[in-house]
């Protein structure tokens, strides 16, 4: 696979959390890369100085056409979008606009611009509250919130577009992404983030006075929600390998879960943070949040069989150590600003 031609890649949302890790993974592997980000939740410091950054929106078809022409773009990794599940329940039209309508504009621009390969940041939320665990790609897709629906609609648009046009795609359904670049080059930087490990690391570094535990009455071993946490750098490497697979077989499209196949409850995660920091984070028990499933754990068999993907950071304590390292660096950066 490493002998394939490395085509120029546009990363949408490349100044954000997962997108910035994908940029580093591409760059580290020698791919030409450019970024488009409207910086609503992204940060310019997350994009390396030698990577072209276009500040703008993926709904701007003229800007997209210019980027494709200037950079010779042949592949897209699409991370731009809104990702907070409870917010999607409260403000569904924002999610259908940002995640579905704007993705349609991007896909149309890609077709017009001769982009041949499209990798989409999808989500396990497309499965809703599955009756089985672990979840395979064939598990029924019945989202229980607008976030999940907005992503599933984009998957369908890609499938239909790939059927009608000379473009293939890979939809990667993420489980719970966590951690940060092991070299602390980037990490989860958004204020008010809702990711459990990010919130716990903020509490551990004194930025919060504790962590809310939403629901202790789920049908799980300790009553709290169980999730499959995947290190963001392992996820980024999966994107690069997926791109290689698309280039290698241009008539094949792929849909794959991205997770480790192992679940941890909220309490187990908080116990791990306490263990790594040798301190106790205050835990506040709150009611369940709208749109949250009790358990979501992936079956990663397909991605393991399809790609030469070997996770390097599949250890909960290591994920937390990297997240903490970034949280401390972020505090220093903001303290010096």
Image: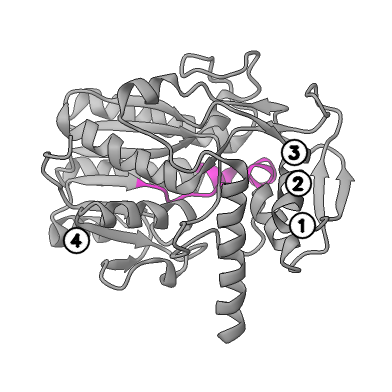
Q: Secondary structure at mark 2?
A: helix
Mark toward the viewer: 4 or 3: 3
Quarter of the image with the C terminus in it: bottom right
The magenta stretch is: 78-96
In 3D space, how far apart are the residues under numbered discs 3 and 2 (Cα atoms)?
5 Å
Which residue in the protein does label 4 denote? 66
* Callout 1 crowding tier (Cα within 10 Å): few <14, some 14–19, many ≥20: few
In 3D space, how far apart are the residues under numbered discs 4 and 1 (Cα atoms)?
52 Å
Left or right: 275 in relation to 248 = right
Which residue in the protein does label 1 denote? 278
Q: Secondary structure at mark 4?
A: helix
The answer to if 309 sits in the magenta stretch is: no
Residue 239: quarter of image? top left
Which residue in the protein does label 2 denote? 270
State which tag comes first along the sequence, 4 or 3: 4
Q: Residue furthest bottom?
A: 336
Mark toward the viewer: 4 or 1: 1
Left or right: 53 in relation to 316 = left
């Amino acid at each position: 696979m490493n002998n394939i031609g490395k085509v120029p890649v546009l990363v949408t949302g490349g100044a954000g959390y997962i997108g910035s890790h994908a940029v580093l993974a591409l760059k580290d592997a020698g791919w030409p890369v450019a970024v488009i980000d409207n910086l609503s939740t992204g940060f310019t410091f997350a994009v390396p100085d030698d990577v072209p950054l276009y500040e703008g929106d993926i709904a701007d078809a003229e800007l997209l056409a210019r980027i494709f022409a200037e950079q010779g773009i042949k592949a897209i990794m699409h991370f731009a979008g809104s990702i907070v599940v409870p917010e999607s329940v409260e403000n569904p039209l924002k999610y259908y606009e940002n995640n579905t309508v704007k993705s349609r504009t991007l896909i149309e621009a890609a077709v017009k611009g001769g982009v041949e390969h499209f990798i989409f940041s999808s989500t396990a939320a497309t499965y809703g509250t599955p009756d089985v665990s672990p979840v395979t790609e064939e598990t029924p897709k019945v989202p229980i919130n607008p976030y999940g629906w907005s992503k599933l609609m984009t998957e369908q648009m890609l499938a239909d577009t790939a059927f009608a046009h000379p473009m293939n795609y890979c939809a990667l359904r993420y489980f719970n992404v966590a951690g940060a670049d092991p070299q602390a080059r980037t990490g989860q930087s958004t204020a008010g983030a809702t990711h459990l490990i990010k919130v716990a690391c903020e509490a551990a570094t004194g930025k919060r006075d504790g962590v809310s535990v939403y629901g202790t009455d789920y049908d799980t071993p300790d009553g709290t929600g169980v999730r499959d946490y995947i290190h963001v750098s392992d996820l980024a490497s999966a994107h690069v390998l997926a791109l290689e697979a698309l280039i290698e077989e241009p008539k094949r499209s792929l849909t794959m879960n991205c997770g480790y196949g192992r679940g941890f409850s909220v309490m187990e995660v908080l116990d791990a943070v306490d263990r790594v920091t040798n301190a106790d984070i205050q835990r506040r028990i709150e009611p369940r949040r709208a749109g949250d499933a009790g358990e979501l754990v992936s079956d990663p068999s397909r991605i393991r069989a399809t790609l030469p993907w070997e996770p390097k950071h599949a250890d909960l304590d290591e994920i937390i150590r990297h997240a903490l390292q970034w949280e401390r660096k972020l505090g220093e950066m903001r303290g010096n600003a």
